[in-house]
Image (cartoon, rainbow, N blue to C red):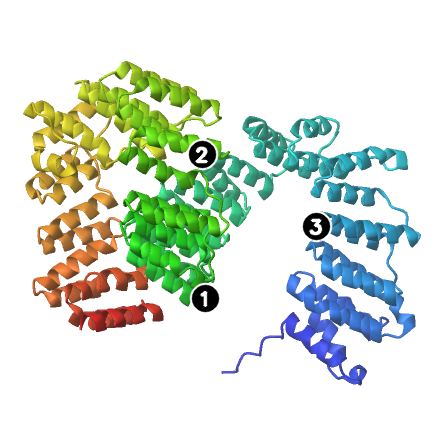
């Protein structure tokens, strides 16, 4: 069988070969030269009259036209051919030079245009013409390089070329892009006086400039003067109106554009998509994204990422992932910003293990994680309570050659302080200088806040002095923990005295500073003074926020003064302050405490935004009051007491109460109760509640599965836990790594090492980050519980599955194993 002929050389290889040939003194005699024009540009007319250098230059220009890279490598070759040609031939390069200029202009390659222009100016003919100047000025103006454009305009005039309408239009664009719209307007107005009537290009350029500077009404007035607007004019107005938040007008302009036969481009669609996202109407944005794809338009990565981000902010991660996956399928490759947005979304909903898995996925797609990626993951681990894994990530980050920044360190210091590890926080702070990081105000404020909350006020004062010495001026956030500590230990007078001292030092107290004192006054039932301080706060320009209002609501609710509490809520709504979960919970507790259970349950209907979603305290409050009613005694709002005392009848009564008040049973409600019952190992009640879920057609979600798996592990029912994990995976959910940790370490503790290894081998570890598997399942779950002998086998299994952890994680594991020995 005959072998197939070798593929022809690529244009890049042929141009590189020609460049090498031209560097030789005897280039004219190289045997390959006569064949190169046909190889480079087969469609080029083969005329024997054109000299070889000219045919070579024309072929190179044509071959390079579709590619930025080829245009880059072709320019030196064409210039070399021009320079090597005898003087009589040089004027004939005019067509090739014009062709290259057009290609450079299409790709906005100003540096290449400048180089070609300089060559023509110094080594012409062909010398630059008016068209050459215009092409160069247009590209420079589009790049907002107005100073250089004006320099070439002066050279154009000195060279005897008269500016024309094309020149004016370019300058209008340049002045608009440099925010000099009034100058652009003046040029526009002068065009008829110079003999150049304004055309649709002139109008489009000025309208876009007016829109970009927010002068939408002027742009619309100018638009009404055009007899036949073009697509660019419509696009500029659609974008301008949408950017200004004038949605209906923007959509109307988009519709007019379609009716006039213009097909909206990606820029017009992108403006509407981004507007929908900003307004929180992400479903409409998503629908428009689909419309773009259907019309054969590929949205930019910025547009697609805006939709992913909007879904993430609403906590609708499955939809965010769907858009993310469709991006890749339809030719819009996600960038590091897209991955970061998705990682933040997962972290915000407590699924840091899903965010961690993105690290390998992005690398596989050629996208390298940046400092922000690691910062988001470190913050996610901290929020999840996995501070040690956050520091492991820091080690991984530095191993990848990325330096931690102030944000990284502030997050870690905050996490240590919140975990009560202030000594470790101080030690980490002391090491910042070695990392080349200078602490900022946030760093000092975070540490001072943590120390004050831990009762280490003297140490906090030392760091306050260090803060001043470091050139960081203390602000209202710095003083808040000191005021809170004074109110707590010495009373509101000392706190108020501190605020007065701030005023004497010309430091304007913040709303937070005042809220601390107001809260203390309300707790002591000193309503008159609390209102006076509230008034002082407002007079200084500090508007109360949801926390301030909630302190007032709580005070009235505690005394059963619900009408006054409702008045505060009404005032809050009038002020445009959105109620959060704490505010709703406070009001709910108030209603329930005076026996108005229906009013309390009905509040759930209003808890719909991301900030006000019902949480574990919401349902705990309602159950506690039902419990009090049944027992006819006070029950403290403590989870342990409620879950030990509550009965199934109380839980079912809660669901009936919710149903009666138009609040459907939600997975969130079931999850809260299941987690509470699981903590108390009440298996019978858990089983009954799952049956109740099925009867009410509430499908278990990922979190409910996780709660049940953890419950079975606590009860050492490992076969049931594994069966549930398998069911979870079959339903498309990804189990939490902690579920694997509990299951595998539990089986190992009971001597079922082979079964643990078998489960480890059968698990889908490719869906997780290999480093995190080792940290949380192997190190935290097995090594630290004394089962290090099984770790080597599990690491080998991971390697066989091509889930190899990083060198830094291998080092961490070695350190842990040596410590255990």
Sequence-earlier tag: 2 or 1: 1
- Characterize the local packing of mark 1: few (<14), some (14-19) or many (20 or more) Cα atoms within 10 angstroms: few
Locate residue 10, reporting x and y percent. Answer: 63, 72
The residue that label 1 is drawn on is 401
Residue 502 numbered tag: 2
The residue that label 3 is drawn on is 143
Left or right, 38 with reference to 343: right
- Characterize the local packing of mark 3: few (<14), some (14-19) or many (20 or more) Cα atoms within 10 angstroms: some
Locate residue 294, reporting x and y percent. Answer: 50, 43
Residue found 34% across the figure and 55% down from its top: 426
485 shown above or below 607: below
Name the image quarter holding residue 819. bottom left
Sequence-earlier tag: 3 or 2: 3
Left or right, 20 with reference to 654: right
Residue found 54% across the figure and 43% down from its top: 295
Q: Check contact, mark 3 vs mark 1: CB within 8 A.
A: no
How far apart in space, not on screen, are marks 3 and 2 (Cα)? 49 Å
Q: Check contact, mark 3 vs mark 2: CB within 8 A.
A: no
Q: Of discs 3 and 2, which sits in the foreground?
A: 2
- Characterize the local packing of mark 2: few (<14), some (14-19) or many (20 or more) Cα atoms within 10 angstroms: some
Q: Nearer the viewer, residue 815 or 294?
A: 815
Residue found 22% across the figure and 73% down from its top: 818
Locate residue 270, reporting x and y percent. Answer: 55, 41
Q: Quadrant of the C terminus?
A: bottom left
Q: Of discs 3 and 1, which sits in the foreground?
A: 1
Count every numbered label the image shows and give the total.
Answer: 3
């Amino acid at each position: 069988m005959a072998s197939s002929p070798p593929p022809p050389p690529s244009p890049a290889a042929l141009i590189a070969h020609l460049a090498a040939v031209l560097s030789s003194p005897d280039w004219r005699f190289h045997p390959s030269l006569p064949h190169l024009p046909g190889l480079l540009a087969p469609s080029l007319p083969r005329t024997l009259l054109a000299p070889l250098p000219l045919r070579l230059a024309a072929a190179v220009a044509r071959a390079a036209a579709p590619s930025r890279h080829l245009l880059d490598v072709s320019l030196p070759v064409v210039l070399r051919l021009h320079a090597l040609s005898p003087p009589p031939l040089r004027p004939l390069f005019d067509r090739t030079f014009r062709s290259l200029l057009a290609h450079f202009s299409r790709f906005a390659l100003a540096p290449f245009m400048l180089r070609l222009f300089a060559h023509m100016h110094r080594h012409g003919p062909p010398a630059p013409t008016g068209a050459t100047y215009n092409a160069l000025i247009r590209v420079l103006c589009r790049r907002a390089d107005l100073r250089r454009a004006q320099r070439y305009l002066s050279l154009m005039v000195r060279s005897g070329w008269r500016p024309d309408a094309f020149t004016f239009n370019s300058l209008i664009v340049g002045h608009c892009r440099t925010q000099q719209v009034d100058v652009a307007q003046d040029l526009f107005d002068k065009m008829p006086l110079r003999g150049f009537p304004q055309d649709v290009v002139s109008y489009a350029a000025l309208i876009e400039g007016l829109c970009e500077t927010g002068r939408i009404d002027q742009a619309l007035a100018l638009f009404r003067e055009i007899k036949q607007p073009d697509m660019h004019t419509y696009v500029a107005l659609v974008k301008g109106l949408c950017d200004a938040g004038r949605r209906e007008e923007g959509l109307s302009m988009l519709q007019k554009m379609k009716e006039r036969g213009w097909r909206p481009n990606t820029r017009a669609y992108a403006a509407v998509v981004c507007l929908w996202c900003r307004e929180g109407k992400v479903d409409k944005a998503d629908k428009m994204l689909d419309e773009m794809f259907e019309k054969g338009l590929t949205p930019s990565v910025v547009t697609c990422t805006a939709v992913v981000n909007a879904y993430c902010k609403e906590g609708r991660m499955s939809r965010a992932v769907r858009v993310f996956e469709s991006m890749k399928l339809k030719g819009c490759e996600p960038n590091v910003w897209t991955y970061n947005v998705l990682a933040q979304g997962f972290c915000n909903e407590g699924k840091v293990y899903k965010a961690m898995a993105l690290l390998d996925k992005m690398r596989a797609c050629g996208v390298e994680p940046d400092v922000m990626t690691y910062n988001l993951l470190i913050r996610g681990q901290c929020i999840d309570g996995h501070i040690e894994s956050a520091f492991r990530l820091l080690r991984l980050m530095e191993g990848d050659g990325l330096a931690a920044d102030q944000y990284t360190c502030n997050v870690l210091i905050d996490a240590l302080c919140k975990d009560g590890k202030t000594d470790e926080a101080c030690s980490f702070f002391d090491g910042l200088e070695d990392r080349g990081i200078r602490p900022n105000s946030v760093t000092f404020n975070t540490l001072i806040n943590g120390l004050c909350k831990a009762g280490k006020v003297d140490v906090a004062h030392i760091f306050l002095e260090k803060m001043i010495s470091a050139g960081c001026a203390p602000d209202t956030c710095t003083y808040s923990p000191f005021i809170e500590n004074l109110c707590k230990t010495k009373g509101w007078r000392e706190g108020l005295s501190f605020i007065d001292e701030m005023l004497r030092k010309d430091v304007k107290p913040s709303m937070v500073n005042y809220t601390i004192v107001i809260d203390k006054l309300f707790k002591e039932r000193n309503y008159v003074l609390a209102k006076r301080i509230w008034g002082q706060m407002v007079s200084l320009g500090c508007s109360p926020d949801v926390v301030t209002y909630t302190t007032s609501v709580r005070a009235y609710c505690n005394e059963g003064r619900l009408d006054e509490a409702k008045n505060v809520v009404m005032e809050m709504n009038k002020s445009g302050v959105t109620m959060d979960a704490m505010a709703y919970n406070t009001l709910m507790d108030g209603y329930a405490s005076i026996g108005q259970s229906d009013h309390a349950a009905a509040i759930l209907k209003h808890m719909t935004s991301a900030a006000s979603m019902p949480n574990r305290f919401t349902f705990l409050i309602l159950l506690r009051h039902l419990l009090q009613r049944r027992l006819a005694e006070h029950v403290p709002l403590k989870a342990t007491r409620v879950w030990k005392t509550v009965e199934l009848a109380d839980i079912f009564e809660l669901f009936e109460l919710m149903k009666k008040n138009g609040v459907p049973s939600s997975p969130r409600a079931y999850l809260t109760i299941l987690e509470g019952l699981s903590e108390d190992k009440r298996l019978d009640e858990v089983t009954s509640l799952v049956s109740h879920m099925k009867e009410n057609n509430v499908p278990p979600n990922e979190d409910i599965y996780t709660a049940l798996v953890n419950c079975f592990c606590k009860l050492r029912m490992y076969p049931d836990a594994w069966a549930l994990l398998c069911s979870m995976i079959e339903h498309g959910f990804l189990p939490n790594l902690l579920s694997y940790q509990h299951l595998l370490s539990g089986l190992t503790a009971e001597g079922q090492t082979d079964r643990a290894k078998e489960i480890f081998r059968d698990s889908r570890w490719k869906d997780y980050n290999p480093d995190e598997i080792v940290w949380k399942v192997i190190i935290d779950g097995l090594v630290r519980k004394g089962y290090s002998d099984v770790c080597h086998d599990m690491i080998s299994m991971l390697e066989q599955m091509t889930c190899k952890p990083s060198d830094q994680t291998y080092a961490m594991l070695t350190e842990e194993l040596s410590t255990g020995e």
